[in-house]
Image (cartoon, grey):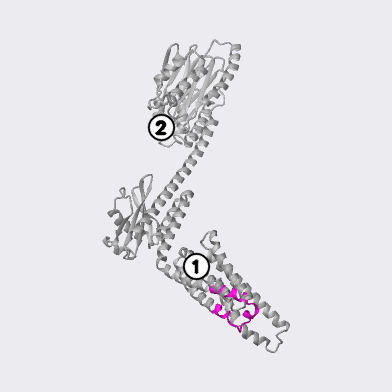
Amino acid sequence: MNIGILSAFIFFLIFFYSSVNSLLFENVNNTGFLPTIFTFVYFLLIIGFTTYMFVALRHLFLLGRSSRQNIYFNTMIVFFLLASVSARFITSDELSFISATFIVVSTMLMVINSLRISWIAFLTKKEKITLLFLSVVITVLFIVNANNTGNESLMLLSFSKPFNVFISLILIYGAIYFSVLFFTTLFHIPTAEVFDRKAQEVSSLQYFSKLITQVLDFDELTETVTDITTKVSDADASWIIWKENDEFIPIANKNIGFVDSDLINKFILQKINWNDLSETKFLMLTEFDELVKVSNLYKALTVSPLKAHGKVKGLLVAIRKDEDRFNEEDKKAIATFSDYASVAIENSGLLEESIEKERLEKELDVAREIQKKILPEKNPFYDELEISSVFIPAFEVGGDFYDFFEISKTKLGFVIADVSGKGISAAFIMAEVKGIFESLSKTIESPKEILINANDILKHTLDTKTFVSAVYGLIDIEKGQMKISRAGHCPVILLRNDIAKSVKPSGIGLGISKDDHFKEHLDEVTIDLEENDAIVLYTDGITEAKNESLEDFGEKYFTEVLLENRNNNVDEISRKVIQEVTMFSHNHSQYDDITLVLLKWKPRQSKEGGRDRQKIKKDGDKEWQNSAHQL
């Protein structure tokens, strides 16, 4: 376009110079100052326009070529200069053949360089038609300007003959170049539409390659898929049939209403097998009986599968109004595009799963923090009682809970509980349970009454799918007695001499019964403690720990481990139990929290000995916490 404008300006300057010159300066001496200024400005304009045109022609020559091909253009310019210089210094007729030779060689190089045009192929059809018109206009202007530079009546020739020759050669080169450009463009017109379509396909695939790595929102992604599908396949409309909860719904409609697409979906699903569709299929809508109900008269369509994890998740539909059936090229293009779209949609689904997983991880972190804060920081100390507690959280937060309540110097309450379910909801319920037992233990001593009151509170707050199993006990140091009640929790194990006795007073889980059924079936058991009696409370995270064969650790093996280590102190017993559970389930991930509380009755231990044991126990607790953390 710039070359065309400059050619018009040069035409104006050359053609109108004589008339303008005579009109302005017919009564002025030609040697005057004003004619000189005018002539100087005139030639500056000629030089400027020609220089810009030369640069533009060089740019067109190099467009789409490697820098190594500069030599062809530079050689042509050298011969332009030789022809211009020879016109100045060779004046005799005998040597005029030298100038003619340079001009002939220059002309041959013009033709050769003009034939080396490659950038036209990359233009769209619309651009090629525009270029066809411009090349005609510019060619005519170059021919007229080249002819005018040889007019001896013009001052251009008398000013500088070499300059005139150089400009003439550039104009001749422009005329030849744009003449060749016209015919080259003319021959590219028939294939322009096919090239445009292929270019659209390539650019669409490149765009979708980016989408695969960027993984956009699902709705935005499907809208992009149908939009590009209409361009790639030259279709009138496009949409996706998506399977959701055994229903087939149209989504991301492009240039078609949902009512029309839903009607056509029924026809498509009758003609193809959803699960067995492995390639793009063609369908003619002339076989569709309800086509009259569709607002537009569509004639042909293609259906391509969109797969995720090897299964067909949706169908990509492209539809046309004309009679022309989709050809094999269309089929290949749509099939390739649907493969890319499948990957992009699958990545979008993975992104949603990743976001959901991250959300759950944050939720679990909150639950773990809650769980950690509501458990006791240290065990209470009594001279007559050894106490050990272990809590090992699973990766997925459970609802295990234990606590001690120092009611007086001679009375200790304790509880172990397990909330059904997992996650942050279980952690919140566990926090509520802690508050309930802590409040009730300050006013009520009877384990049975505490569980009854706890149930009365929880039955109004827990939903029908949630309950809490618990064991609450009270040890009277002065009397050497222990009272316990059990609300559907694991049995309490009493180790006495060489026997492990399972203490299972009746009772159902807290929050299950909404009436007096809980109270009627709840018992309280009193046990007179003997020296070296050990009371073991635990959650099912121990007995239900699994090995690689999915076998449970079990109560039997658990009891055997307790009996083998019954003569050790409670910390040693706890350490051995956890060690055995860990070794048993080392090839299987821990699914549930592990909670273990041991109390050992030592009534004959002296006060002084008790203080020594307290120091040993604190050191042992610290060592045990480190060991439990590693496990």
Q: Which residue carries the number 2 mark?
A: 512
In the image, the segment drawn in magenta is 144-172
Residue 208 or residue 156, whichever sits in front: 156
Q: Residue at x 51, y 30 (%)?
A: 434
Per the picture, the main secondary structure of the magenta-coloured stretch is helix
- The answer to which image quadrant residue 316 occupies is bottom left
Q: Which residue carries the number 1 mark?
A: 112
Depicted 327 relative to depicted 214: above or below: below
Inspect this view and state whether residue 488 appears: no
C-alpha separation, residue under disc 2 versus residue under disc 1: 96 Å
What is the x, y in percent for residue 169?
56, 73
Give the structural element (helix, strand or loop) at label 1: helix
Amino acid type shown at disc 2: Ile
Q: Residue at x 29, y 53 (%)?
A: 272
Please say whether residue 513 is one of the residues in the magenta stretch.
no
* Of callouts 2 and 1, the N-terminal one: 1
Depicted 273 relative to depicted 448: above or below: below
Total marks in image: 2
Please say whether residue 167 is one of the residues in the magenta stretch.
yes
Residue 550 or residue 104, whichever sits in front: 104
Amino acid type shown at disc 1: Ile
